[in-house]
Image (spheres, coloured by chain):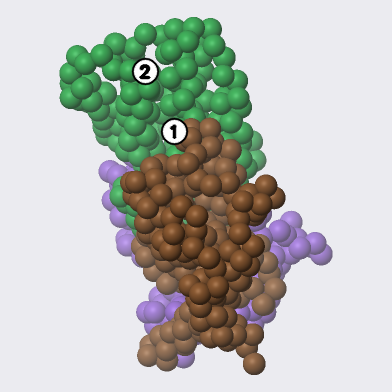
């Protein structure tokens, strides 16, 4: 499926304070974009606006599948997202969280493969409250990609990860980059190099 | 010129009518003149609720740029409505004391105004809890619509549970026969000028709200 | 949509059973409240009206103490953005409604037998009594669930929940108290109108909740 994101002069204000304005983008399959900028420049906010979780103060974000526009309410079916503000259920185990998110596209084997690839297979029946920060971060990435979305938004994907974890996730991002739209908000040089284009906010 | 400014003529004129033109009531004497204040106040409290509900619906469902201030208008109207509902309750209970001998009797209309007052209090508490922003407008508007939807159920249930002491509805065709012609004229005039007063205050409060928002933006 | 709804319902029950402190304290509250009230009233022979009022007040406060949790948990644990990302607002509301309904009927299963025994109810029409409890309980759940979403999203807590719920629950409480009294006073009497009233009220609130939930639940 060929999903296209189109953002037209998008701007956001909070209580009269302008965060950013005039962001115009057009992303299609295979594109990868890095959002860069100092703390408080609105990276996460722009990520949420581009994923249609937050409406912009000005401008328009639209999703297209081929030529037809995707209804705002069903955009979430095409989008995967991981970030520090997206907190899975601590009472549930890794597998239960995946079951909650999964729409069944990749089957039990696919889930196991994902868990193994990110070193969480042994912990699949552990409640998330007993996970370390790094393990949680890896699970967040699995939850974002489990439905094989055509667009993926990542907010600092390498945060709190050890070198091995970073390698797993960066490798996976790179291998999938060609088949989807990838948007990363980060100030990390290595994560920036995963993307073909870079947008700097607040500069 | 703003039409609502005519309130500066209409209100004094109505006040003069209520004291000099209208005759004293049959049983209550001069004390009965409170009706010319109580009835319009009650009407305004209900009108303000309807206006607040209307703007709440506009805020949620209209996409037109003219609807941008609807949540502010809804809140302004609800604040005024709360104020008028308190005055209605006070004037009503004074009247009740004079004619039935006690300040509060839980008759259907007293009950209804009390429920309206509770809804206003609930709405304003909710509004006070939320921080300024788009979310506040939407959540408060949703609550107001849910509250408004329960009102027909009250109209159905309250008279079933509480026996009435109130005089027949004033605008009821039968009841108007019982009322002196001059009293009727006076009442119509006061209702009209109180409505003007509401509209005038509404415009004033709305301008204050807009200016405060602008000032907050500048100070930031 | 169907699969999503089932996943949501399953998740609600799983989470609440993994960490059952909220549910357990709701059950304790309902039991303790019923027994305390009957202790306070001592062995006085209460009239059916008083008995019904006490029963429904206990039910009201139990609702206030137990049904806020599913929505406020999402905000407290910071899981709301995750849920918003993976489910539509409609299935979130529907799943919480199902959970609350199941929880509330279970709570009524505690309250009702205790109340019947300790208040010495004489059930002249037991079946009508049960149907009233079902219809009234459902109306309370439907109303309170959408209001709990409002409270959770506004960052409020229990007191705000009671303030904004009470005026809207009044018609339900009045009607349920009346029907309960009928079932205690007269055998075989069917006051179908009040049941229809309760069901119509629930239907209206549920329809409105589904219409408004996206304004309440989604970020703006």
- Secondary structure at badge 1 equals helix
- Image hue for chain A: purple
**Chain with colour brown in the figure:** B
Residue C97 as seen in the image, left or right of residue A160: right
Location of mark 2 (residue): C48
* Display colour for chain C: green
Out of B29 and C141, give the one closest to the viewer. B29
Q: Chain of mark 2?
A: C
Q: In the rendered image of this protein, does residue A125 appear above or below residue B189?
A: above
> Residue at label 1?
C173
Q: Residue furthest right?
A: A67
Quadrant for the N terminus of chain B in the image: bottom right
Q: CA distance from mark 2 to mark 1?
A: 15 Å
Q: Where is residue A86 drawn, in percent x and y?
A: 43, 57
- Front-most of A48 and C179? C179
* 2 and 1 marks in contact (CB < 8 Å): no
Mark 1 residue crowding within 10 angstroms, few (<14) / some (14–19) / many (20+): many
User: Which image quarter is the C terminus of chain B in?
Assistant: bottom left
**Which circle's residue, 2 or 1, is located before the other in the chain?**
2
* Residue drawn 71% across the image and 58% down it: A71
Residue A73 visible? The answer is: yes
Q: Nearer the viewer, residue C119 or A29?
A: C119
Label 2 environment density (alpha carbons within 10 Å; few <14, some 14–19, many ≥20): many
């Amino acid at each position: 499926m060929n999903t296209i994101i189109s953002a037209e002069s998008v701007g956001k204000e909070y209580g009269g304070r302008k965060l950013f304005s005039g962001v115009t983008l057009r992303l299609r399959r295979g594109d990868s974009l890095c959002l860069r900028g100092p703390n408080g420049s609105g990276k996460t906010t722009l990520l949420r606006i581009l994923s249609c979780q937050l409406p912009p103060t000005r401008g328009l974000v639209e999703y297209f599948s081929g030529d037809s526009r995707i209804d705002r309410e069903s955009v979430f079916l095409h989008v995967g997202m991981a970030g520090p503000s997206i907190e899975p259920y601590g009472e549930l185990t890794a597998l239960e969280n995946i079951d909650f998110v999964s729409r069944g596209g990749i089957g039990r084997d696919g889930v196991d493969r994902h868990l193994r690839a990110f070193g969480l297979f042994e912990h699949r029946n552990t409640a998330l409250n007993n996970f370390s920060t790094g393990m949680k971060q890896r699970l967040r990435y699995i939850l974002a990609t489990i439905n094989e979305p055509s667009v993926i938004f990542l907010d600092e994907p390498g945060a709190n990860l050890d070198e091995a974890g970073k390698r797993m996730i960066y490798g996976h991002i790179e291998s999938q980059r060609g088949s989807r739209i990838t948007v990363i908000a980060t100030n990390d040089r290595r994560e920036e190099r995963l993307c073909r284009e870079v947008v700097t906010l607040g500069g | 010129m703003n039409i609502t400014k005519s309130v500066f003529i209409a209100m004094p004129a109505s006040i003069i009518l209520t004291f000099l033109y209208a005759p004293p009531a049959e049983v209550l004497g001069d004390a009965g003149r409170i009706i010319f204040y109580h009835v319009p106040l009650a009407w305004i409290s209900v009108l303000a609720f309807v206006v607040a509900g209307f703007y709440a619906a506009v805020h949620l469902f209209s996409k037109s740029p003219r609807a941008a201030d609807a949540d502010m208008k809804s809140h302004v109207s609800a604040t005024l409505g709360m104020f008028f509902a308190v005055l209605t309750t006070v004037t009503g209970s004074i009247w009740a004391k004079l004619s039935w001998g006690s300040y509060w009797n839980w008759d259907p209309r007293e009950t209804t105004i009390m429920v309206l007052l509770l809804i206003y209090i609930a709405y304003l508490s909710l509004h006070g809890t939320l921080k300024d922003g788009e979310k506040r407008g939407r959540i408060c508007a949703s609550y107001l619509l849910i509250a408004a939807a329960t009102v027909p159920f009250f109209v159905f249930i309250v008279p079933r549970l509480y026996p009435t002491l109130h005089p027949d509805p004033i605008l009821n065709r039968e009841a108007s026969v019982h009322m002196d012609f001059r009293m009727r004229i006076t009442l119509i005039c006061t209702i009209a000028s109180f409505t003007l007063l509401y509209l005038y205050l509404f415009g004033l409060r709305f301008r204050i709200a807009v200016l405060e928002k602008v000032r907050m933006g500048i100070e930031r | 949509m169907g699969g999503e709804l089932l996943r949501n319902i399953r998740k609600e029950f799983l989470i609440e059973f993994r960490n059952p402190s909220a549910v357990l304290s709701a059950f304790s509250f309902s039991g303790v409240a019923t027994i305390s009230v009957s202790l306070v009233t001592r062995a006085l022979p209460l009239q059916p009206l008083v008995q019904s009022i006490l029963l429904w007040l206990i039910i009201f406060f139990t609702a206030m103490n137990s049904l806020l949790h599913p929505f406020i948990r999402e905000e407290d644990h910071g899981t709301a953005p995750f849920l918003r990302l993976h489910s539509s607002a409609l299935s979130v509301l529907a799943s919480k409604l199902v959970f609350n309904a199941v929880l509330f009927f279970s709570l009524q299963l505690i309250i009702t037998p205790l109340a019947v025994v300790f208040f010495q109810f004489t059930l002249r029409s037991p079946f009508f009594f049960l149907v009233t409890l079902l219809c009234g309980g459902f109306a309370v759940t439907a109303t309170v669930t959408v209001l709990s979403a409002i409270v959770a999203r506004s960052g409020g807590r229990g007191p705000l929940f009671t303030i904004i719920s009470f005026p809207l629950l009044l018609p339900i409480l009045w009607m349920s108290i009346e029907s309960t009294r009928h079932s205690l006073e007269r055998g075989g009497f069917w006051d179908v109108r009040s049941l229809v009233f309760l069901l119509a009220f629930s239907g209206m609130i549920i329809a409105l909740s589904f219409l408004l939930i996206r304004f309440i639940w989604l970020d703006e």
